[in-house]
Image (cartoon, rainbow, N blue to C red):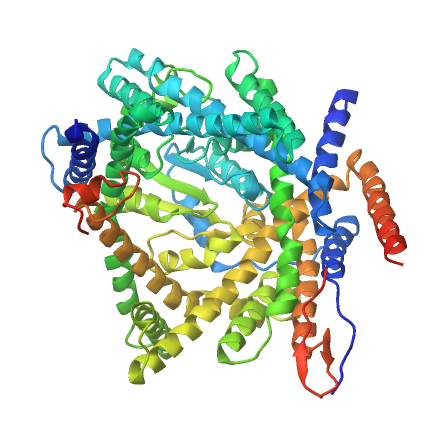
Amino acid sequence: MSFFKQQVPFYILVFTAIVMIVAFFIDIPGLGGVATELSRIGVPVTAFALLLGGISLFRRHVVVVSKQERNWEFSVVLLLSFAWYFGVNVIPGMEVIARESFSRVVGKLNEGMFAIVVPFMASMAYRAFKIKDANSAFFTISAVIVLIGNAPIGDSLSPLLPMARDWLLNIPNTGAMRAVNIGIAFGIFAYGLRVMLGYERLALGEIMEKLKGGSQ
Amino acid sequence: MSISTRNIDARWIYLAVMISIILPILFPIGLPISISEGARDVYNAVEAVPEGGYVIFFPSFNYGGKGEMFSMAQAFIKHCLSQNLKLVIISFAEPMMSLIGEEAFLSVGIENYGAVYGEDIVHLGLLAGGEVTEAGFAADVHALVQVDYYGTPISELPIMDNLRSANDIDLVIILTNGGDSPAQELRQFKTGFGVAVTGGAVGGVYGSIVPYIDSGQLSGYLPSLRGTAEYELLLGKPGTAILGMDAQSLMHIVVLIFIILGNLGVGTTISKTGQQYHREVTE
Amino acid sequence: MSIFDQVIVLFTTALILMAFSFLYRENKWFTLAQYVLIGGLGGQKSAEGWVIFINSTIKATGSGNIIGPILGTVFALLMATMFVPSYAWLSRWAIAILIGTGIGVNVRAAAQTQISAQILATISGFSGTDIFSNINSLIILIGVLTVLVTFMFIPKSEGLVKHTTSIGRYFLMVAFGATFSYAILGRGSNLISRWQELLTYPSYLLIPVAAAFITYDVLKNRKSSS
């Protein structure tokens, strides 16, 4: 039984990863089709995971309401909101109501929630953008140049401002971010290799340790 | 030296930001906007697609980024339809992205461009699975997609007849909220099949995407609302992006003023011993 | 605009103003708006997940190829076993497929897209004639090298490495400053689009109501503190 619980998931992981990589580089008859089918399997699995996430949220707040824990009244509101949006989307014939009620209510509320970040960013700029040393000087001056360069008033004040913004973005920023992107790519390789060799616990948990006899 | 002994309550800063946005909306100024090379590159990338060519459009942003990206989506749809291109709208990440994609093309009014749903434009909805599903889509479209967003089998949609794989695609337009885009589209479409990739990003991630523009992997990319405003000017179809730029100007000026005040020491206080230290902004 | 549409607009405006009230101070109205949002997003996402699951399994069998839909259904249902403790180990099979395919597609093209193309762009920027272009390319090259050294040698900084990482940090500070400014541009757009709607009829009718609530709270707090 431990073979099915521990080793089979690991072999599935390694097999699917190798198929996807080899199919990309080597044109083996049939392998491309297998890779496509594996991609195809991912669609219902990921979609079902979305559903399971919603079920978890629903379950948690049902418990809060039943035990009348802290803020249980708000959990009632959450459950009603959840039930409405789930219902109008799965009941046939209510597609227009589903689309309209989401885009006109929750969609706009979602935008509003993200929008309140801006005043906090302004407050943070007041408190944190202080030139105390070389690092903060580079940070603040770069932020100021890009701020003015982005605003249309910068275009009106001087054509040099948008040019300075573009230079900052295309030259020093590119140098830094290119290194970051290269580092990320090396990280992708390293992490993928570690997972395929069994050095990462992941969601497969203690399987890896037991396969290697408890060592990492 | 004492500059000011008053602490600025953060809520006054919030109010100043709000007023800086409300005033230009009520009393528009109409400041001119210059057009950057980046916006021209994006415009030219769409213009380069031959008539009847396939454009895959990924509105990969959720409602949190709608304020800065929705007008960009509308501008791209208008441009593609006015060029008589075949537009395929699809999402691989979040369910809400397919809602936004639908909202975008409905708000444009495709009939104004002589386009017919199913022949010139189609909405395939969400194919959950992220980059894995993108890879499958690029390899074999009909294996991954059976129905469109409204449940119509793709065999009944003429636009899907000649779209079999990424080899049939002329341009990928990706509007991203962040995450691994557009790197994953570059991996799956550009590197794998040589398809041109362009689009736009929210402001916070644009800086990390510039290296891909510089290396030529991206055929230009629009930064947030500013890029959209420039693109709308190039198209000759002013939209909501241009309307918001006056408010952007004043808001940026207010933020700049607060940065200067912070550096001048406004809001600091001198202790009895003469040592200067910064007081925390109190709520 | 019909009466029903106006009611919907006013309802949404009230929720948005409740969200904005967080800027004044944390309060129960903001919490109410927050829970409406979480419930709405949760319901919408799980419903769409269900619809996509049906479209990619049951409805997909009509295309003739049934292997993918059947296997997809099986693995999706295996994932549901995570709610049953004694059978939760079955969900690892589904998770293993997602992780394996994800690693495969990420790794296979990353070298060309994010490493070789980027390195090539860095070193091929030098042209024979244009001095300014060569200076810019040199700055990019210095930036790439110093930032890479910064990431690799952060714990140990002495001598030449210390100076190199200092320069790398300056490049990173420039990049972060630019990113912050673009973030203000981006998030500011959200706020501007909200206000563009709030300042239209009938939304603006609720703004004095919200202002009255806040004024009342300010006066009440002043009274209780004095």
Residue ID at (47%, 30%):
B95
Q: Position of residue B163 (x, y in %)?
A: 31, 28
Residue A159 visible in rendering: no
Residue situated in front as seen by the camera: A74 or C47: A74
Residue B90 position by quadrant: top left
Q: Is residue A119 above or below residue B179?
A: below
A200 vs A77: above or below: below
- For the N terminus of chain A, the quadrant is top left
Residue that appears at 76% across and 60% down: B12
Residue at image point 39% right, 45% down: B48
Q: Residue furthest front?
A: A67
Q: Nearer the viewer, residue B219 or B277?
A: B277
Q: Which of the 4 image quarters holds residue A35?
A: top left
Residue A5's x, y, as percent?
Answer: 21, 30
Query: Left of A95 or right of it: where is B180?
Result: left
Tell me: A194 left or right of B175: left
> Residue B106, how many percent across, how many down?
56, 28
> Picture coordinates of residue B119 (x, y %)?
42, 22
Q: Nearer the viewer, residue B180 or B246?
A: B180
Instruction: Report the number of numbered marks.
Output: 0
Residue C33 is left or right of residue C110, and the answer is right
- From where the camera sits, is residue C34 visible? yes
